[in-house]
Image (cartoon, grey):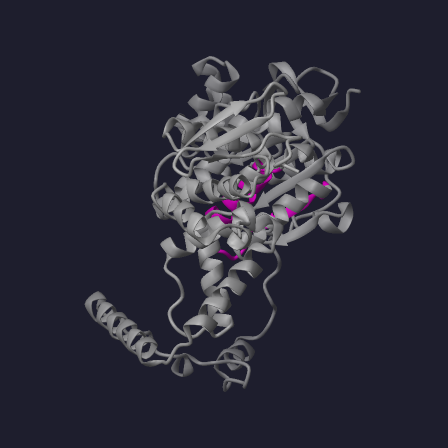
Amino acid sequence: MTVSIDMGEVRGVGASAPCTFDLEELLATRLLVQGNSGSGKSHLLRRLLEQSAPWVQQVIVDPEGDFVTLSDRFGHVVVDAAGSERDLAVIAARVRAHRVSVVLNLEGLEPDRQMKAAAVFLNALFEAERDHWYPVLVVVDEAQLFAPAASGDTGEEARRVALGAMTNLMCRGRKRGLAGVIATQRLAKLAKNVAAEASNFLMGRTFLDIDMARAADLLGMEKRQAEAFRNLDRGHFVALGPAVSRRPMTVRIGAVETTGRGGGPKLTPLPQARPEELQDLLFQPASNGERSAAERPPTPQVVPASEVLERLTRQAAAREAALEAEPLDREAHEKSVAALIAELLGDGEAAFQPVAALYQDFLVRCRIARLPGRPPELAEFRQRVALARAGVEPSDVDPAVWSAAETVAASLPEEMRGVYLLIAKAALEGRVCPPDAEIARAYGTRSPGRARWLLTHMEEQGVLVCVNDLRGNRIVTLTDLDCQTAAPGSRAAG
């Protein structure tokens, strides 16, 4: 079924003709919108979103909070990005699972925080389970903020993660159902590898030569024709692409049903009052709700970096001394740590979170629980998580044999330890080899393919040997323990 959405009318062809977009083609080929501030980009995006809302799920990355008004008319859920990154990732996964149209509101955040929040949300949309790869129109306004062509005032880490998320959206998102629609004020400020993946273009008014040249190049126009972009009226765009037209044409965007919270400045009459009344208004005593300049807090004094470091060192030393002086019940401490890790991994999504992110969450839980003593270091925490993910308990295994298995596991890289002990326990208890899904969970991934790859890698390292019986069932031999998993249907597997 072909779905056409009305974007306005084509100009310059005598009688006006409607301009329609093939929505299915647009989802497959993506869209790039460019125009200076005031050219009508937000109006164009709003028209596109309103016309396509009944047909496709939508996700809008909104740095200025301009599109939150869509919720009143079309039911979009507004997601405030001021929450934690973990919460954003969970919400994004639910957005794909339940096919909810949302507006990610980044208004009021610092640029670095905007970039990281958008990256977390987009990456979670990208990494959704295959069963949830429904078509989604992902609109990113002011895309040059999230995919800058060069480093600027933002941190390098924030720029890297945001650029990676935008690249995934535009380059690899199509197979996952993600159709990127990006809008930018200047093509020169947008990363080329992100802009190059769009096949449909709507170019609005622009004045700088470098931007006009890039716009003309993308539309296949001659250099002398680039001057036409300076003469475009507000709300007029030159369109080209398989979802719009095979030849460049000028389009006037139609009216919209909703309005943004911003908008251009409107001239209003100045207040009419006599000079003496205005003077009294300005110089009357300050009310309780007002604060004069004299009552404002003084400008904070700049503290030298050396003094800040010295203070932090003193505080860290004081905390260390307090921990050393505090009596500690080791057994109770271990039980508390184990309980907190079990609680942390009780969340189904935690099994697939990076260990570094889990560790930060674990430290917060330790502070909330007022855990006495020093919490485990990252390396020890990583080992505990690997064992917890694998779900291994040595209760049914000879302690001496299990100790040997733990010794072998300790000599392996961290990512192999949990999987090795999972298979070792199955072998020592005479059970069959765990399935790929269980191995993948112990490895911290949803992908059975990565689980099979890990077994192959461990086999190449000489840790184990994998063979298949006549029925194609996998049997794993652990060379250092001189034992193997049982074959399905055997008495040992029983």
Q: Quadrant of the N terminus?
A: top right
The picture places residue 187, in percent across and down from the top left corner, at 45, 30
Asked if one can make out residue 40 in the rendered structure from this viewpoint, the answer is no
Instruction: Specify whether 77 is left or right of 214.
Output: right
Span of residues in magenta:
99-128
The picture places residue 138, in percent across and down from the top left corner, at 61, 36
Which quadrant of the figure has residue 169? top right
Q: Nearer the viewer, residue 149 or 44?
A: 149
Q: Residue furthest front?
A: 491
Asked if one can make out residue 18 in the rendered structure from this viewpoint, the answer is yes
Instruction: Specify whether 202 is left or right of 72.
Output: left
Assess whether residue 106 is covered by the magenta stretch. Answer: yes
Q: Is residue 117 above or below residue 192?
A: below
Query: How many numbered discs sit on the rendered protein?
Result: 0
Assess whether residue 123 is covered by the magenta stretch. Answer: yes
Q: Quadrant of the C terminus?
A: top right
Q: Is residue 206 above or below residue 416?
A: above
